[in-house]
């Protein structure tokens, strides 16, 4: 296929230029009814391609025309049998993957560092998660990803389970050895599902870790909008048909996705795929160069650390790799929190980072960055480093840890059980009924059905008190929802 083609976008432009009279949705009628302020700011043209399902531009619910062709181009370049455009991000994709692949009560072998959308998919289906234990004793200040041996051991121990669910890269850009894991899982008759939200670009540059599809994964979802040219919410799902029921997957996507998908979001997927296929190596090569330069400069700044690829590989005993476009800057040497550094970068230097946690700020370098942007970041960090920071001791324990909590009910049972709200500090021994995360990265510290322990409460309090955004507690972040009359001693 000709990867320079953009069938969906071309059809949208040609329909917009034909200036047909619209008596259909959207109600703004090519922008004529839109607020003047909005039109003045963004210009009139964008509204002319805010379309709905029409013969000329096909339908995402049942693609037979230009959307089908655009999805086929994506499938070809990513090496999938079928690719799907998603308009509710990778969150929607994770939910669809779970609902399409697992039946009520069916076990799934899953890493504990999953995004909360995987857990919400489990609540929808009633499947039974079997979490793979997560080791943290590798000496990194942030969570690396799962080691190959830990996953292979779990595959051996649970060889009756038919589905393995992984996340790679994680938020910090750390990847799993997907080639070895997929080989081992397939040998046991397991299919492998992958949350690759942070990896839509990996397929397009040889110096990046392997992509899921290249590694033989059966189903992988990617946030095209996070790293390459998709607009916010635009993701893609890639499937291989050998172990995945594509008919059931298409049905689930029809159920879970809106019947009014944004054509602007879908066009951005069409164009992002074309851009990666035709210029990916050049654009990503430049992003890698910038990221390497910035990492080198940041490592020279007193008090800061920023692990490089070789160090991550060494710390993980060669079992993890790093996407070098992610810079995780460890600020513990300044005796301040990542949240404080993030806030100062924003308010004093006009620099917004992807995320902060207690010990780090995380920077994404992408095809949209220029040398000047990275110079501005480095100069701001140099300026902050000139202040008299007290020399803080570095804790050997990563601030963000995922606990191997005891799962006493399935997420679905706990979610639908009667619940009550109790003070967080008094909840030891109770069973969580909501997903509790620190956001970002949005990885659950508690999954519905899990027993709440003192170390989890301590961690939640520590993050809350240091200014993290908490998700799954009440508005004051002091109360938690638990299953009623379960584990309360009543
Ligand atoms: C690992 C992971 N999966 C899924 C998601 C959700 O992706 P989206 O924002 O595209 O819905 C995120 C978001 O941060 C994530 O980090």
Image (tube, rainbow, N blue to C red):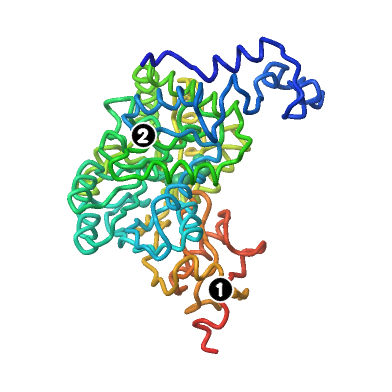
Q: Which mark is residue 300?
A: 2
Residue 164 vs 175, above or below: the answer is below
Asked whether 412 or 61 is in front, the reply is 61
Q: Is residue 315 left or right of residue 284?
A: left
Q: Which mark is residue 241?
A: none
Asked whether 221 or 399 is in front, the reply is 221
- At mark 1, the secondary structure is loop
Mark 2, mark 1: which one is toward the viewer? Answer: 1
Q: Is residue 26 left or right of residue 304?
A: right
Q: Position of residue 340 (x, y in %)?
A: 55, 47
Q: Position of residue 430 (x, y in %)?
A: 50, 77
Name the residue located 50 percent from the left edge and 32 percent from the top edge.
225
**How far apart in space, not on screen, are marks 2 and 1 (Cα)?**
54 Å
10 Å neighbourhood of mark 2: few (<14), some, or many (≥20)?
A: few
Q: Is residue 84 left or right of residue 422?
A: left
Name the residue located 31 percent from the left edge and 60 percent from the top edge.
132
The residue identified by callout 1 is 417
Q: Position of residue 99 (x, y in %)?
A: 45, 52
Asked whether 471 or 5 is in front, the reply is 5
Toward which corner of the image does residue 150 lie, by quadrant? bottom left
Quarter of the image that includes the N terminus? top left
- At mark 2, the secondary structure is loop
Asked whether 203 or 281 is in front, the reply is 203
Toward which corner of the image does residue 220 lie, by quadrant? top left
């Amino acid at each position: 296929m000709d990867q320079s083609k953009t069938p969906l976008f071309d059809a949208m432009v040609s329909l917009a230029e034909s200036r047909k009279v619209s008596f259909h949705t959207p109600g703004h009628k090519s922008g004529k009814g839109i607020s003047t302020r909005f039109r003045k700011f963004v210009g009139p043209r964008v509204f002319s391609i805010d379309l709905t399902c029409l013969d000329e531009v096909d339908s995402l619910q049942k693609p037979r025309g230009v959307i089908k062709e655009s999805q086929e181009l994506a499938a070809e370049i990513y090496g999938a049998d079928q690719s799907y455009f998603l308009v509710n991000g990778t969150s929607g994709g994770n939910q669809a993957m779970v609902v399409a692949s697992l039946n009520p009560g069916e076990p799934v072998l899953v890493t504990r560092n999953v995004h909360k959308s995987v857990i919400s998919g489990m609540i929808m289906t009633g499947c039974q998660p079997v979490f793979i234990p997560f080791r943290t004793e590798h000496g990194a200040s942030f969570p690396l990803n799962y080691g190959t041996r830990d996953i292979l051991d779990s595959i051996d121990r649970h060889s009756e389970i038919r589905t393995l669910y992984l996340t790679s890269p994680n938020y910090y850009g750390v990847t799993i050895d997907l080639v070895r894991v997929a080989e081992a899982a397939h040998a046991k008759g397991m299919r492998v599902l992958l949350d690759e939200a942070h990896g839509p670009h990996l397929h397009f540059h040889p110096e990046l870790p392997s992509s899921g599809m290249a590694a033989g994964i059966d189903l992988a979802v990617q946030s095209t909008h996070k790293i390459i040219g998709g607009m916010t919410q635009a993701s893609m799902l890639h499937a291989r048909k050998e172990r995945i029921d594509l008919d059931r997957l298409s049905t689930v996507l029809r159920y879970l996705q809106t019947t009014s998908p944004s054509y602007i979001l879908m066009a951005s997927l069409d164009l992002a795929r074309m851009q990666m296929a035709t210029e990916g190596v050049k654009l990503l090569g430049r992003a890698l160069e910038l990221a390497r330069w910035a990492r080198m400069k940041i490592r020279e700044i007193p008090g800061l650390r920023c692990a490089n690829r070789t160090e991550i590989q060494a710390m993980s005993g060669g079992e993890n790799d790093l996407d070098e476009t992610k810079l995780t800057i460890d600020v513990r040497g300044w005796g301040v929190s990542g949240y404080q550094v993030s806030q100062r970068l924003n308010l004093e230097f006009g620099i917004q980072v992807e995320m902060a946690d207690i010990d780090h700020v995380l920077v994404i370098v992408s095809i949209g960055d220029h040398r000047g942007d990275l110079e501005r970041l480095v100069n701001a960090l140099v300026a902050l480093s000139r202040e008299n920071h007290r020399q803080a001791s570095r804790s050997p324990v990563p601030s963000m840890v995922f606990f191997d909590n005891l799962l006493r009910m399935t997420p679905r049972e706990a979610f639908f059980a009667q619940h009550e709200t109790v003070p967080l500090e008094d909840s030891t021994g109770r069973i969580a009924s909501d997903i509790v995360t620190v956001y970002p990265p949005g990885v659950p510290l508690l999954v519905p059905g899990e027993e709440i322990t003192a170390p989890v409460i301590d961690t939640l309090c520590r993050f809350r008190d240091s200014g993290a955004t908490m998700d799954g507690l009440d508005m004051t972040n002091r109360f938690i929802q638990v299953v009623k009359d379960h584990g309360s001693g009543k």
